[in-house]
Structures are given as C-alpha cells and as structure tokens.
Image: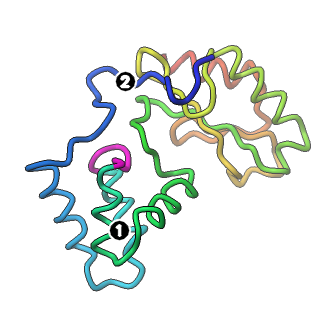
Amino acid sequence: MQSPANASHPPNTPKVAVLDGEGLERLHAIIARHAGSEGPLLPILHDVQAEWGMIPEAAQPIIGSALGMSRAEVYGVVSFYHDFREAPAGRHVLRLCRAEACQSVGADALAEQVRGALGLDWHETSADGRLTLEPVFCLGLCACAPAAQMNDRLVGRATVQRVVALAEGAR
C-alpha cells in the first residue's frame, strides 16, 4: 500500500490548486460572501471545497488573515473535520465507519480486509482516479454496524464482499 504522502491523484486534477489571478479572485469572492456573518470559517471552507474539490494549502493563510486567525488555526479546523480534504478525491468516495459501535462488531477487521482487497490505505485515491478510501467517525447506522458509505449510499451490516463489490462497481 502507498503512504498517504504518495497517494495517487485523479487524472486531469491538479495536486495543488493554483491561487493566482482568477483563483485568488474566486477565493476573495468566497470570503467576501461571508464577511460580517457570525462564525464564517466553516461556511467559507465548505464553499472553497465546493469550488476546488479540496481546501488548497495556499488558501489557508489567506482565509486566516481575512478572519483574524492564524494559518494554524485554519489548518486545525481543516484537519479536524473529515469532510474537508487537502487533496482532491476520486470520482467515488468509499467511507468506512471507525466509531466504537462499529468497532465492537468487527469494523477493524472489515477495514483491514477492504484496504487489502482494494490496495488502498486511508485517504488514498486509486491510480485511475475513480476511488478514494476514507475513514469516518459515525455514519449513524450504529444499530446495523459495521457501516460503510459509497458516495451517498449508506450500507449497514457491511461485509467485505458487499463493500468490495460496491468499490469495484465504481471502478
């Protein structure tokens, strides 16, 4: 398995979003839309991710400066919430629940087997750019754990066979 630092990125998707010229203007427009609102950081980050498919590292100090925050504070929020990404995801995202309820019924073994079957580690994207594997902490399916999610489709009582079949269908 590759380490996250060497994870593949989807074809035709830049590894780093360029924030000069038009990109910088778009970032400033996003920030301006939320100026004066209470607690603007999360809405700004959601809009930035919708724009670029990720939170570019170069955007973080600009956002921080506009909000009177340090780059470290912005990064802390980006790295804390699993929905924010620092690299583009594949066309399909497979999430496996890592919360305690799922762990109590075999999620660790499920995750290990799925990672091995797909040849992906957490936060990695397949070489063809079609699939990204992510851990998630609770999908709200505790009563039917272990749980997985493929794009918007939730899967309760997930098995290796079901999850790998979903992932292969996405490829």
x and y percentages locating residue 75 in the rendered image: 47, 58
At a point 33% along the width and 61% down the height, the residue shown is: 61
* Location of residue 42 by image quarter: bottom left
Give coordinates of residue 155: x percent, y percent. 68, 37
Residue shown at the point (16%, 55%) measured from the top left? 24
The residue tagged 1 is 64
Q: Within 10 angstroms of label 1, few (less than 14), some, or many (20 or more) residues? A: some
Nearest the eye: 87 or 150? 87
47 to 125, vertically: above or below: below
Of labels 2 and 1, the one closer to you: 1
**Residue at point 36% right, 48% down?**
57
Q: CA distance from mark 2 to mark 1?
A: 28 Å
Chain-order first, disc 2 or disc 1: 2
Dot label at residue 119: none
Secondary structure under the numbered disc 1 in the rendered image = helix
Q: Nearer the viewer, residue 162 or 109?
A: 109
Circle 1: residue type: Gly
Q: Are marks 2 and 1 in contact (CB under 8 Å)?
A: no
Residue kind at label 2, given as amino acid type: Pro
